[in-house]
Image (spheres, rainbow, N blue to C red):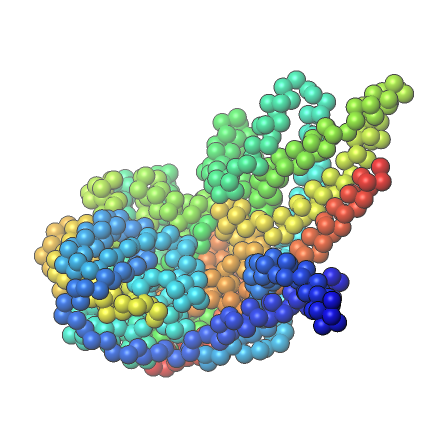
Amino acid sequence: MSITAAKRYRLIRQIEPYLFLAPALVVIGLIFAFPIVRLITLSFQRPFQGQMLFVGLTNYQAIFRDEVFLRAVRNNLTLLISVPIMVFVALILAIFLFDRIRGWQFYRTTLFLPYLLPITVVGLIFSYIFQLSGVLNDFLKVIGLERFILDWLGSTRLALPTLMFVIVWKEVGFGIVLFLARLMSVEEELFDAAKIDGANWWKLQWHITLPQLATTIEFFTIVSIITILSWVFGYVYVMTGGGPGNATMVTELFIYLTGFRYNQMNIASAVSVILLLVTGIFIFLELRLRERSVTLEEVS
Amino acid sequence: MNKTRFFLILLTLVSLLAACAQPATPPPAEPQQPAATEAPAQPAEAEPVKLVMWWWGEQEAPGAQQWLDETIAEYQKLHRNVTIEAVLQSTDSLIPAFQSAAAAQQGPDIQYFWGGVWTLEFAWNGALVPLDDLIPAEERAHYINNFERTYDGKLWGMGWYLSGNPMVYNPTLFEKAGIDLNDLPDTWDELIAACDKLNAIGVTPISGGLKDGWFGGWLFSILGRQNLDSEKDFMKASIGEAKFTDPAYAEWWERLHQLKEAKCWNADINSVDYQQGQDQFVQGKSAMIFGNDTFLKGWAEIIGWDNMGVMRVPKYGSGKLADTYVVTAQGLGITSWSQHKQEAADFLMFMHTPDRLNAWFKYTGVLPADDRFDTAQIDQPILKQIFEWVVQSAGPNLENFIPSMLDEQANFTGTQLLFAGEKTPAELAQLTEDVIQKWREQNPDQLQNFVNWYSK
C-alpha cells in the first residue's frame, strides 16, 4: 500500500462516521435545530417598513413590561402548586392499589381513564360542570348547600383553582400508573422481611415504599412541572380562554394570542424562547435524573 | 468523534438550512399592485383551474353552506374547467390558519375576512391583492360597505353579506312585565326601568356570554360609539391623537356598569360563552339580547317570528354614531400567491349575480352586500325593519377600526373584569389607554399603517 493510498484510507476512515451520522443530523437539524434557530432570530427582530430589523433585546424588554405576560407567568407559577398535590394524591392512591384493596384492578383502570381522555373533551365537560348554572351548582342546590354555590369559572378568584383541580384530576392517573408499575417491580421479599421484623404499615411505606419510589417520584415531579409550564394550553383555551380578566392567562396562551391574534410574531417568539429555556432546564434535570437512576440500578 | 466536532457539524448543517430558508424579510409593507390580468369573458376551456376558498359564515348565517354548495355547483356547470373547494373554518381558526398561510405564501385563493382591520392587516403584509384590476369599477360600485376595505385608494376585498346588531326582544315577556310594545325603551333610563320590570317578574332582562371574549368586543362596538361621530374618532385614539380615557370614549364603561348594577344581565355572564348567552334568549330565559341580525331567520325557525321583535339600542349619548345601526359587510379577498386571481375574481362576481343574491337571502334571511338585491323579496316585517335601518342609518362596526390587541386586552378582558366586580369604569378606561399605548410601543409598523389609514 502506497503512502497516498494509506492517507486516503485514513481520511475515509475519519470521514466515515460523519457520513453515517449525516442523515440523522439532517433530520435533527430540520426538525429541532432549524426551528429553534429561526425562533431565536425572530425574537431579536421586528418588522418595520417591509424589513425585518435587528432590535436587540427590545422584544424581551417589551414583554417584561407587559402586565398580561407577567400575569401569565404568575399564573404558571401558581399552577405549580398542583405538582405536589398530584404527587401526593398519586402516591397515596398507588400505595392503596398496591395493597390490593378489594376491586383494585377496577380502581386502577378507573383512575387511569381520565389521563386517556382528550384534553378538549375534559375541558368541555368540566366547563359545563363548573359554570354558574352548571351541574355542580345544580347539585349543591338539590342537596341544600346553596351557600356553596359559586361562579367557579366566572370569578377571577376561583377560575385558576378550578382549572388546577381539573388538571390534577386528569394528570394524576399518569402518576398512579407510574408509581404502581415501579412498586410492582420491587421484590416482595423486601416487604416480607420487614413484616417479619415487625414493621407496621407506616414503617413499610416510610422505609421501603418511599425509598423504592424515590427516582420515580423525582421523574413524575419533573414531568409534571414541564406539563404545568408548557402543556396546559388545551385546558385553559377550552375552559376559560385565559379569562375572566386574564385570571387564567398562561404563557402558552399568551404566545398563541400574541402571535396569531395580534400578529406580533416577534414578541411571541421572544416569549417562546424564554419558555423554551425554562422548560429546557427541567428537561435537562430530568435527563440527569434518568442517568442517575440507570447508574444506581447498575450499581445495585 | 469528539463533542466539538459533532457540534461543529450540527452547526454547519443548521447554518446551511438557515441559509436555504427564505430571508427573514417579509413582503413589503406597502401593498403590491398586481400586474393587470386580462379578464377573460369565458375562462379558457382547456386549462383546468382549481380554486380553494377558506370561508366562515355558516356560524352566523345558517344556510350559507347550502347556498355556497349550490353556487359552486352552478359556477362549475358554467365553467367546466374550474373546480372550487370550499373549506369552512371555525371562528377560532379563521385568522390563525390564514396567518400561517400568509407566512408560508401558500393556501387558499379566496379567503373570508371580517371588515376593516381584519382585512387590511393582510393587505398591509402583502397577503392580499386589490380587486381594482380584477373586478371592473362598475361592478365594484354595487358592493355595500366598500369603505371598510378601502386603503390607499384601492379595494382589498369584496363584501359578501351584511351583519348588523339590533337589540332583539321577546314581546311576550315584555307584555308580561308591563312594557308597552308601542313605546319600547329608547333611552338608557328607560332601558334600566325595563330591567326593573322584568326582574320583578323573575325574568332575566338581557343575556350574554363573555367567557370566550367576543361579546366584549360587541358591547364596545354597540355601546362605545354613542358619544362619537365616526369610526375615525376611534382610529384617532388608537394612533394617540385622543385618549380612551377622555369622557366621550370612557362613558360606555360607566353605562355598562349601570346595567350591571341594575341587574339587567344574566348572573352567569362570565361563565358562559357568547353562543350560550344568545341561546338563553331563544330558550325564553331572557327578554332581550344585543343580537346579530344574521341569526334572526334561524331563531325564527325555532321560536317563530311572532315571539321576537327588534329595536334600536337605547341611547345615552349624543354623538352622530348614537343614531346609527351597526352594520358590517363580511367579505372575501383574493390572495397574493393565488395562481388564478382572475378566475377567483370571476367567481366572486358570480356570487353577486342577481340570481345568487336572491338565493342567498332565501337560504339565510341575511341581506347580501350588494345594492342589486331584489328587496321585494323581504316580506317579513322584522327583516323589513332591519333593511330600513341598514338603508337609512347604517354605521360602522367599531371593532373593525381598532387594533385587535386593543379589542382583546381591553374590551374582552375589561368587560369580564367589570362583571367580576374587579375594576371600576374609570380603571377600565385607563386599562384601555394602557393597552393602546403598549400596542403603539410594540408595533411601530402597524401604527404607521393605522396612521396612513386614518389620514387617507
Vertical side of B219 occupied by A240: above or below:
above
Vertical side of B300 occupied by A104: above or below:
above
Tell me what residue is drawn at x 75 percent, y 72 percent. Answer: A3
Q: Please provide percent x and percent y for residue B167.
A: 29, 53
Closer-to-camera residue (B292/A206): A206
Q: Please provide percent x and percent y for residue B41.
A: 14, 70
Closer-to-camera residue (B306/B275): B275
Tell me what residue is drawn at x 39 percent, y 44 percent. Answer: B276
Closer-to-camera residue (B151/A186): A186
> From this viewpoint, is residue B32 visible?
yes
Q: Please provide percent x and percent y for residue B128.
A: 34, 70
Extreme front residue here? A1
Q: Please provide percent x and percent y for residue A85.
A: 69, 39
Tell me what residue is drawn at x 63 percent, y 19 percent. Answer: A103
> From this viewpoint, is residue A123 visible?
no
Vertical side of A297 occupied by A254: above or below:
below
Q: Is residue B357 left or right of residue B86?
A: left
Vertical side of A140 occupied by B314: above or below:
below
Extreme left residue here? B376
